[in-house]
Image: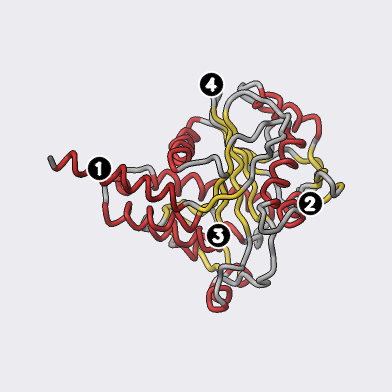
Amino acid sequence: MALVTLLVLVIAGGIWVDVSLSRTDALPSDSKTTSRGTNWLIVGSDSRQQLTPEERKRYATGDETSQLTDTIMILHTGSGPTTLVSIPRDSLLNIPGHGVAKVNSAYARGGGPDGGGPELLVKTIENATGLHIDHYAEIGFLGVVKVVDAVGGVELDVPESIKDPKAALDIKAGRQTLDGPTALGYVRTRATASSDFGRVERQRALLSALLDKVTGPSTLLNPFRIVPLASQLSGAITVDNGDHVWDLARLAFAMRGLSDGISTTVPVADGAVHWDKTRAKALFAALANDEAPPKNALGP
């Protein structure tokens, strides 16, 4: 009887989270792009609109009017290795209807209450990569803080000490547990010698560690973590109108496959602005065919 009650509670909780998820029109209904496997577009928005003045000061987020995408990643799953690809936010790409511009501005250029921003970003990514985007997930500044804190922090091996007042970050090198505000500063900072490339590596590392924690027994079997996590997910993550909580669960478990998969950045020709067209084409052609990308097509 207790097992049946627990099962009913789990199902009811899952339905509540699914109904409560924020949704938007992100996937273009007129997309002509086709590819094999499954592709997620994972976006970190730097919007400050949901932050109070005190929170903007605490997290050193600055201008409250920004509507750019601070993080852009593609997660590919299928018969080949699970592959997570970071797209540098300063990449110059053709934004449909707006010409060539930094990819992180696509969200803002399509902005508005009708959800045009995410859809324009998806169109830009599909056109640039040739990959069909099947699912969309977006998390904002406050969402990172809330989800990390809900699971009791995330353990990471920090390779170098970083002090960056612009990201409200002062962290020492070594293995440690990051709370929500520290995790946010860690993925935002550019105050290292590797600048944007180090930044996207930190973003991939945090995302992988966070989803590993979310799907681990210390969270799933602990009601004092799974309940707060469920309550925070509804306000922290925005998905496409066709996505559901079980899709997010598949995303989380797919990220666990990265331990045997590939984590990389789009190969670039100069800094993080222009892609190396030959290598980038080889990378995305392999993913479109659901194959392992050649090693020489991988970025830093």
Labels 2 and 3: the sequence-earlier one: 2
- Is 156 on the left or on the right of 190, as rendered? left
Q: Is residue 223 left or right of residue 172?
A: left
In the orientation shown, which residue stands out farthest toward the right?
99
According to the picture, the residue beneath numbered tag 2 turns out to be 102
User: For mark 4, what is the residue?
Assistant: 79
Q: Are marks 2 and 3 in contact (CB under 8 Å)?
A: no
Q: Position of residue 208 (x, y in %)?
A: 49, 44
Please provide percent x and percent y for residue 202: 57, 51
Q: Residue at x 55, y 40 (%)?
A: 242
Q: Amino acid at mark 3?
A: Tyr
Where residue 172 appears, as percent x and y from the top left, is 50, 63
Single out the mark in the foreground, 2 or 1.
Answer: 1
| 80 over 2 or under it: above or below | above
Which residue is at 74% across, 53% downward? 110
Front residue of this view, candidates 77 and 282: 77
The disc placed on residue 8 is 1
Identified by mark 4, the residue type is: Ser
